[in-house]
Image (cartoon, helix red, strand yellow):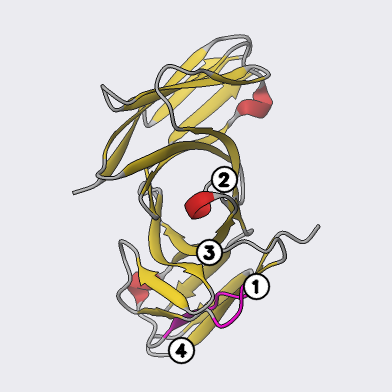
């Protein structure tokens, strides 16, 4: 059972570089989302999607783009990395109405220097 | 502004103790409240609550929601060292999740 798969697990970027964090789920969930987790701040929603072709912004969307061309995949793009984007990123997918009982990937630890 | 506040921020207990973790919220369009346990990596789902006064129970863990007073509690009885983790509360506001900052529980032998 793969569940929610995130890649890479670790990444170091230089300021100004771009990259894509990958997220794939094999549970046929309609709802997928991206969070960042910073010390003492819990999880904050970056972007979410309620189905293929539909995305929307969460609490902290600036500096990030998403797309949802298939049900399975929901990549997160950092266009021009900044040190403030140093964080642990989690992708989640959900079954039921609006992503309830969300299942999380194992996280990506990103450092921007 | 939607927000979720958890208390206490951290807690140290000994094995066998009972603990109560608190979660209060202010969100529009409330749909559900969820509890998660986070050890070293990804949060894992514990409970989802949608109705007031109905206790959800799983082994030594239980949780209840009060939609009038806008809070939930998570109880853990007869704590074990394996319960050491960060416990996260999240509220689903229509189609967005809002998380609290978590309660870090440390259970000592």
Which mark's residue is nearer the viewer, 4 or 3? 3
| Magenta highlight range | A69-78
Sequence-wise first label, 3 or 2: 3
Query: What kind of element bears circle 2?
Result: loop
Residue carrying label 3: A32
Q: Residue at x 48, y 54 (%)?
A: A98
Up the image or down, B87 lies above or below A58; here it is: above
- Furthest residue to the right? A1
In the figure, A74 relative to B2: above or below?
A: below
**Disc 4 target residue:** A18
Residue that numbered label 1 is attached to:
A72
In this rendering, the count of numbered labels is 4
User: Dot 4: within a 10 Å radius of its alpha carbon, few (fewer than 14), some, or many (20 or more) residues?
Assistant: few
Q: Secondary structure at mark 4?
A: loop
Mark found first going from the N terminus, 1 or 2? 1
- The 10 Å Cα crowd at callout 3, few under 14, some 14 to 19, many 20 or more, is many
Residue A71 inside the magenta-drawn segment: yes
Nearer to us in this view, B68 or A47: B68
Q: Marks 1 and 2, how far apart in space?
A: 17 Å
Query: Which residue does the numbered mark 2 point to in the structure image?
Result: A101
Classify mark 1: residues with Cα within 10 Å, few (<14), some (14-19) or many (20+).
Answer: some
């Amino acid at each position: 059972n793969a569940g929610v798969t995130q890649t890479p697990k670790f990444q170091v970027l230089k300021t100004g570089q771009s990259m894509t964090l990958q997220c794939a789920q094999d549970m046929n969930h309609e709802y997928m989302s991206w969070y960042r987790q910073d010390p003492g701040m819990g999880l904050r929603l970056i972007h979410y999607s309620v189905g293929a072709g539909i995305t929307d912004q969460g609490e902290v969307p600036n500096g990030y783009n998403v797309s949802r061309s298939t049900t399975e995949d929901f990549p997160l793009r950092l266009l021009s990395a900044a040190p403030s984007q140093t964080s642990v990123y989690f992708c989640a997918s959900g079954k039921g109405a609006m992503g309830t009982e969300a299942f999380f990937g194992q996280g990506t630890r990103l450092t921007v220097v | 502004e939607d927000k979720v506040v958890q208390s206490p921020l951290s807690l140290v207990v000994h094995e066998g103790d009972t603990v109560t973790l608190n979660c209060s919220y202010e969100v529009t369009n409330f749909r559900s409240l969820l509890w998660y346990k986070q050890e070293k990596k990804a949060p894992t789902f514990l409970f989802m609550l949608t109705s007031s006064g109905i206790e959800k129970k799983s082994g030594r863990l239980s949780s209840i929601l009060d939609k009038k007073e806008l809070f939930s509690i998570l109880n853990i009885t007869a704590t074990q060292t394996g319960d050491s983790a960060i416990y996260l509360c999240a509220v689903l506001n229509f189609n967005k999740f809002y998380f609290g900052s978590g309660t870090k529980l440390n259970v000592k032998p």
